[in-house]
Image: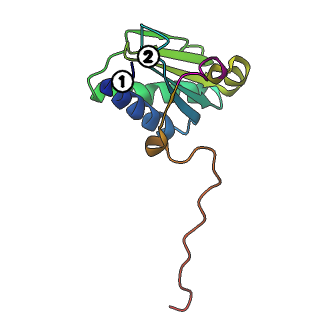
Amino acid sequence: MTATPRAIELIQAAAAAASEKKATEIVAFDVSDQLVITDAFLVASAANERQVKSVVDEIEDALRLLGAKPVRREGVRDGRWALIDYADIVVHVQHAEERQFYALERLWRDCPSIDVTDAVGPLDGPPAAPAAFDQDL
């Protein structure tokens, strides 16, 4: 069994929204073979509590446009580890310290990853070099 096309659509939209608010280390896993309650997880990091809240708001806005409503939200007020459950997917937005401590990737490393690079761009790569221009003009 693999994640449904709807789950993949929601993961891609959530990843793009998280990236828009400068979340880092955005990864997604197809957990449909391991869990019956959801198809996929998205995990993203934020530098501080304010950014965690901002990322969550952006994800909720983006998924609302796709007709998705969260069935459960936890931790948003504290801003350390927010969990948004959409039934098809579960989104984790973690403060960088919680991300390092809990290491969710380690727990789900046996699950296939879902490629979100089209939604967020290359992960943790160096910034793109500025385009060269002709100085002889």
Relative side of 12 to 21, left or right:
left
Residue 96 percent location from the top left of the image: 68, 27
Q: Nearer the viewer, residue 132 or 118?
A: 118
55 drawn magenta: no
Q: Residue furthest bottom?
A: 136
Camera-nearest residue between 70 and 7:
7
Kind of residue indicated by mark 1:
Ala
Query: Residue 60 occupies which quadrant of the picture?
Result: top left
Q: Residue at x 49, y 43 (%)?
A: 117
Q: What residue range appears in magenta?
A: 106-111
Which label number is shown at residue 38? none
Q: Are marks 1 and 2 in contact (CB under 8 Å)?
A: yes
- Name the quadrant containing residue 79: top right
Residue occupying the point 48% across, 24% down: 56
Q: Which residue is mark 2?
A: 32
Q: Which residue is mark 1?
A: 7
